[in-house]
Image (cartoon, rainbow, N blue to C red):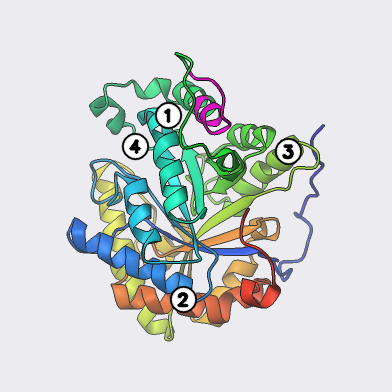
Amino acid sequence: MGRRSTSTALEPETTTPSIKRLGFFTRLLDQADAAERYRLATAQIAQAEKCGLDSAWIAQHHFHEGEGGLPAPFVFLAHVAAHTSRIRLGTGIVTLPLELPIRVAEDAVVTDLLSGGRLEVGVGPGGNLTAFTAFGLDSDDRHGLFDRHLALLKTAWSGGELAGGDRLYPASPTLVDRIWQATFTVAGARRAGAAGDGLMLSRTQPRSPDAPRASLADIQNPMLDAYLEALPKGREPRILASRTVFVADDHTEAMKLAETGLSRMRHRLAATGNLLSGNLVGDLIAAMDVHIGTPDEVIASLRSDTTLRRATDLTMQVHSIDPPHPYILRSIELFADKVAPALGWVPKAESGERQIA
């Protein structure tokens, strides 16, 4: 029987989260060519490690440079591993239905070994449906493919016998305990919990027509309830909440950068038929669930997000603002030094805790 969750709906808005681990997430969307994007993302992850963050996560995207800049996450993470020494390195996510699961298992094991055991593996069914056609697949089959591929991935990492009698080499049974499932739905959260995997929550989610003004917490707290209820007894929850966070020294400068980046995103969404209501920067900030401003402003904004009260991990990303590289480096620094400690995060060097196992 799963564990019971406790509703937070009636708790005061001033309740402070208690974040165990802090992360940085990038979709590699710097305004540059691919090679420069990879160089800048490596520098940003190195900055995250320097500032004491616990993890860094990268997204996989195929074909669309405006959505993300990286189709080969394990290749990139192996490169980043050579430029870092402590920070954990995660995929957020691998689009598992598009991959050969045995190849994912092999690539992940090699990356984990090269990094000294620092790999975390986030997986999901994928959101870019046009990519399935290029891979010769039907997007309607993505959830079934995901389930089958994830099961095979776990069998391979656990040392189980594969078709034909072979077993994975090199072996890495501990990777099974470092799987995270990304989902937008209560049902998906329940499946992740029942499997004992980590749960990855998105920085923003579409609102339904019958609740257009719902907060992100209104959508994601029921997902947390389902995850915790389904989690096997004795299994520690792993809940990663990704949030768009841009911290700056000056409020006015932050808003100018937000207006540029969010307007760019708004036009990109409009080109694909996804329209956002409102034209003012404040409307776009609200529509995309952005936490922005000076450290004190961002602290207040994140404290109002009731989802974070049960999250074990908080991961910041600057998308959809996507400011220039120097501002990203400064935002990481301010997030670690000023914002996160106010949310209960303690750097591992001070707490004496181990990293994610």
In this view of the protein, which residue sits in the foreground, 136 or 152?
A: 152
Q: CA distance from mark 4 to mark 3?
A: 29 Å
Label 4: few (<14), some (14–19) or many (≥20) C-alpha neighbours in 10 Å? some
Q: Amino acid at mark 1?
A: Pro
Q: Is residue 161 above or below residue 56?
A: above
Q: Nearer the viewer, mark 4 or mark 3?
A: 3
Q: Which residue is mark 1?
A: 101
Q: State which tag comes first along the sequence, 2 or 4.
A: 2
Amino acid of disc 2: Lys
Viewer-nearest residue: 228 or 350: 350
The answer to whether any part of residue 215 appears in the image is: no
Nearest to the eye among marks 1 and 4: give it: 1
Residue that mark 4 sits on: 128
Residue at the spot of label 2: 50
**Which quadrant: the N terminus?**
top right
Q: Residue at x 51, y 36 (%)?
A: 171
Q: Nearer the viewer, mark 3 or mark 1?
A: 1
| Labels 3, 2: front one | 2
